[in-house]
Amino acid sequence: MDVKTKKDLAVDFINSIRSMDPSALNALIVKEAGEDLAQFFLSYSANLISKDPSRVLENTSSLMLMGYLIRSYEEKNQQQAKAGFQGYAFA
């Protein structure tokens, strides 16, 4: 069985969305994140990049990692809710 690393999965995902039709990508974003979250990230990233345009690569990387951490946070909260716990513990 071929077990993929987190990096392998990220590369697979990025490659799949890079080849998506823009309307399909937009539909995926709306389905998975919703309009409110998409608008929040658009506003947040525009604000972040406008503060220091010379750091656009660092900021882009940070935004991608933030998205990953948000997903992790959501998953942990869902697991805790199923187990009857509330909150999030940072390790």
Image: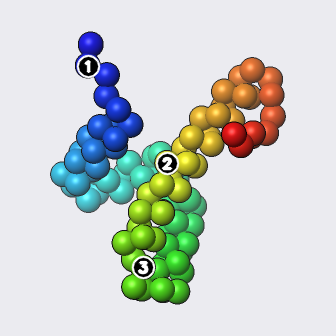
State left or right for residue 72 relative to residue 61. Answer: right
Residue at image location 69% in from the left, 40% down from the top: 91
Q: Could you say whether the residue bearing mark 1 is in a helix, strand or loop? A: loop
Residue 69 position, x and y percent, is 55, 48
Q: Quadrant of residue 12?
A: top left
- Taking 23 as reference, is 68 above or below it? above
**Which mark, by number, is residue 80?**
none
Comes first in the chain, label 2 or label 1: 1
**Which mark, by number, is residue 55?**
3
Characterize the local packing of mark 3: few (<14), some (14-19) or many (20 or more) Cα atoms within 10 angstroms: few
Q: Could you say whether the residue bearing mark 2 is in a helix, strand or loop? A: helix
Q: Nearer the viewer, residue 76 or 54?
A: 54
Q: Could you say whether the residue bearing mark 3 is in a helix, strand or loop? A: helix
Residue at image location 62% in from the left, 41% down from the top: 74
Q: Is residue 39 visible?
A: no
Comes first in the chain, label 3 or label 2: 3
Amino acid type, mark 2 = Tyr
Residue at image location 66% in from the left, 27% down from the top: 79
Q: Nearer the viewer, residue 57 or 15?
A: 57
Disc 1 from disc 3: Cα separation: 37 Å
The residue pinned by badge 1 equals: 2
Comes first in the chain, label 1 or label 3: 1
Disc 3 from disc 2: Cα separation: 20 Å
The residue pinned by badge 2 equals: 68
Query: Is the N terminus in the top left, top right, bottom left or bottom right quadrant?
Result: top left
Disc 2 from disc 1: Cα separation: 23 Å
Q: Quadrant of residue 89?
A: top right
Characterize the local packing of mark 1: few (<14), some (14-19) or many (20 or more) Cα atoms within 10 angstroms: few
Amino acid type, mark 3 = Arg
Q: Nearer the viewer, residue 35 or 75?
A: 75
Residue 28 position, x and y percent, is 38, 48
